[in-house]
Amino acid sequence: MRWGQWGVRMDSDRLRTMIEECLESGIDTFDHADIYGGPHATESDFGRVLGADPALRSRMKIITKCGILLPDKPSSAPRIKHYDTSARYILTSAEQSLSSLKTDHIDLFLIHRPDPLMQPEEMAEAFFRLKRDGKVLHFGVSNFKASQLRMIHRHWPVEVNQLQVSVEHPHALFDGSVDACMELGVRVQAWSPLGAGSMDGAAEDERLRKIHAVAEIIAQRHGLEASQVLLAWVLTHPAKITPVLGTSRIERMRTAVAVGMQRLDREEWFMLLRASTGRDVA
Ligand SMILES: NC(=O)c1ccc[n+]([C@@H]2O[C@H](COP(=O)([O-])OP(=O)(O)OC[C@H]3O[C@@H](n4cnc5c(N)ncnc54)[C@H](OP(=O)(O)O)[C@@H]3O)[C@@H](O)[C@H]2O)c1
């Protein structure tokens, strides 16, 4: 999301270097969405690198998402941002992602946001066809609450729910979303695990400043960086959450990978939660 037009606008050479350095660091999964950078734009940038070096594809797994439609140009349809989870749209978007990414399969295909008009039977029919044809290996959802997850899960055993989870934004741990994932055996991926970089501007915001100060104290205890402590907070949760990192800097990727098996003890975990919510637990 942050490597293309919506972020640092890497050209093909930089993108290729970043991909190779990630692979060498042990990061082998790349998170896309049809809308990143504009309709299929960042997928196409990434696809150009894979097209030039097809051997790279076998070393990685690709996630992409569909379901959000953005108005592209003032004159183009759609005219307003909206969701579409019809079978027809899911199939069309998947085909376009395959072509943009220059790949014959997507490893994990997510429905980007819960659509109030979604029909789980129809979504399952689209998933069935994509899986039968070998175009998608695994399916999941993103930003689904517990009830929405259970509804789709009755019709298709989705494997992943990609949720916003961080010290700064811990709500999915309390609104039942993560509980439902654990109940149903759905893996949780955390987007913006470092609060979308908001710690950079921590000085501006009292709450973020407190979170950062606590992260620094814990970091010094363990000989870590504060960003690693924030990541360890996510990793400490028993749902075995997988962070989806957004940095465009390889050294920050390596710092994140170096967290390894580091976990926080309960008191440290709750210290950060208290800094985030502003109060002790009841
Ligand atoms: N499913 C969804 O609805 C959804 C929504 C949003 C995002 N996502 C996915 O989740 C990914 C991650 O989200 P995110 O980019 O907001 O996550 P993030 O890892 O929390 O934030 C990354 C941002 O933080 C900055 N940053 C500042 N200090 C950093 C540090 N010490 N270490 C690492 N980064 C630091 C990065 O800047 P630099 O680049 O300069 O390091 C980058 O702009 C996205 O790229 C996208 O693929 C999914």
Image: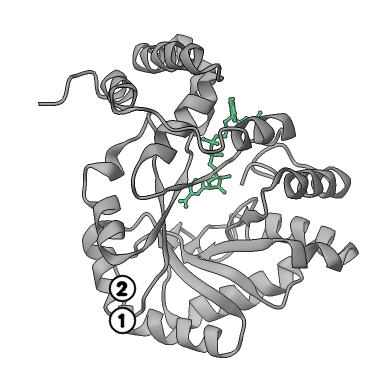
Residue at (15, 25) in percent of width and height: 281
Q: Residue furthest left?
A: 282
Q: Position of residue 129 (x, y in %)?
A: 51, 89
Q: Is residue 258 above or below residue 211?
A: below
Residue 210: image location, x then y, percent: 36, 12
- Is residue 260 visible in the rendered image? The answer is yes
Ligand 1 is found in the corner quadrant, namely: top right
Determine if residue 67 is in view.
no
Protein image colouring? one colour
* Left or right, 188 with reference to 244: left
Question: Residue 101, position in %: x, y?
Answer: 72, 66
Q: Which residue is mark 1?
A: 155
Residue at x 51% of width, y 73% of height: 138
Residue topped by disc 2: 152
Residue type, label 1: His
At label 2, counting other C-alpha atoms closer than 10 Å, the crowd grade (few under 14, some 14-19, many 20 or more) is: many
Residue at 52 percent of width and 57 percent of height:
70
Check if mark 1's residue and mark 2's residue have beta carbons within 8 Å.
yes
Distance between the Cα atoms at labels 1 and 2?
5 Å
Q: Secondary structure at mark 2?
A: helix
- Pick the front one: 33 or 217: 217
- Name the element at disc 1: loop
